Amino acid sequence: MDLKDRLTELKFKALGEIETVEDLKRINEIRVNLLGKKGPITEVLRGMKDLSKEERPVVGSFANKVRDELTEAIAKRSEKLEIIKIAKKLEKEKIDVTLPGVSVKVGQSHIIMQVIDQLEKFFLGMGYQVVDGPEVEEDHYNFEMMNLPKDHPARDMQDTFYITNQILMRTQTSPVQARTMEKHDFSKGPLKMISPGKVYRRDTDDATHSHQFHQVEGLVIDKHITMADLKGTLQAIARTVFGDEREIRLRPSYFPFTEPSVEVDVSCFKCGGNGCSVCKQTGWIEVLGAGMVHPNVLTMAGIDSTVYGGFAFGLGPDRFAMLKYGVDDIREFYLNDVRFLSQFSQKGQR
Ligand code: PHE
């Protein structure tokens, strides 16, 4: 068989193979085998040295034509296989938009924060500022400046975590009163503030006690502040948190930093005052402590108590939340069980 015939036979065999090959890796192998240095075309061309001068260019150009044809066939087939591959991939990756989605769990404020947020919003609206204070506090601010000197018996009312003799975990938010009074410039207007935050007491945890809980302190200092201002403010708090029909009642009490001091009851939101299990059949629920700021407290903070006076109150958001939502164990707030917390959705809250 002469060289031209061998080339022609080779060409048809190769073309057949190229046409039917199904994968890209294989076609690359065919290309290397067929057209490479060790391939059959090179092999055939090697035999040209035995040809005559006249035959050589004829066979040479024929061989080149065969190589070009095969190269083109391989390129075409590769392109086609590439397209098929992409089409298959797209088919596999098709997104079914009718499948149900994955629901994303959205968090929410803790129930205590919801109560605090509601109170902040209310007081900001009345022109109060919201002030922060340290939880690790000095005895000086937590007690001394609140009219509770070292040997005062009322210190026993609040069991304290001491860190050193002088440093403690604050037992109340009242020290923020003293810190704010010291700094306030009365030439710029009256002092009206609330201070929400955590407080700590050396209590044994049970359904109604927690060694850590929350308070919101309130303080107003100006000229001519009376107990009527306090009562109106407390009434407004009670109605904001517990509903528009609520009444309040003040009972005499004792706090070292207020004189007179009062305990504040709100008419029962469950029975409207008739008596039920929530109000222990009394029609009233105790919700906070308050009073007119003691002159000693003003004097210690550098305020002239003959000119200025005011009121203060301290309320417990934990207790508010327990009452409002019927939670009977304060520890629930601190266990952070999402099943408990997620019951208090903010929808329709504010
Ligand atoms: N600090 C008091 C307490 O923790 C509450 C209070 C604050 C009472 C302000 C009167 C005025 O019991």
Image (cartoon, rainbow, N blue to C red):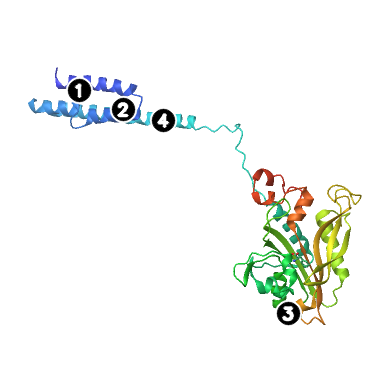
Discs 4, 1 touching: Cβ within 8 Å: no
Pick the residue in front: 154 or 196.
Answer: 154
Q: Earlier in the sequence, mark 4 or mark 1?
A: 1
Residue 9 in view (yes/no): yes
Pick the residue in front: 64 or 110.
Answer: 110
- Residue 118's mark? none
Q: Nearer the viewer, mark 2 or mark 1?
A: 2
Discs 2, 1 touching: Cβ within 8 Å: no
- Left or right: 167 as drawn, with respect to 290: left
Q: Earlier in the sequence, mark 4 or mark 3?
A: 4
Q: Position of residue 332 (x, y in %)?
A: 69, 48
What crowding class fits label 4: few (fewer than 14 Cα within 10 Å), some (14-19), or many (20 or more)? some
> In the rendered image, which residue does mark 2 sit on?
26
Q: Nearer the viewer, mark 3 or mark 1?
A: 3
Compared with residue 38, is residue 175 higher up or lower down, i.e. above or below? below
> In the rendered image, which residue does mark 1 sit on?
7
- Mark-to-mark CA distance, 2 and 1: 22 Å
> In the rendered image, which residue does mark 4 sit on?
85
- Identified at 45% across, 29% down, the residue is 88
- Mark-to-mark CA distance, 4 and 2: 14 Å
> In the rendered image, which residue does mark 3 sit on?
300
Q: Position of residue 85 (x, y in %)?
A: 41, 30
Q: Quadrant of the N terminus?
A: top left
Pick the residue in front: 250 or 71.
Answer: 250
Q: Nearer the viewer, mark 3 or mark 2?
A: 3
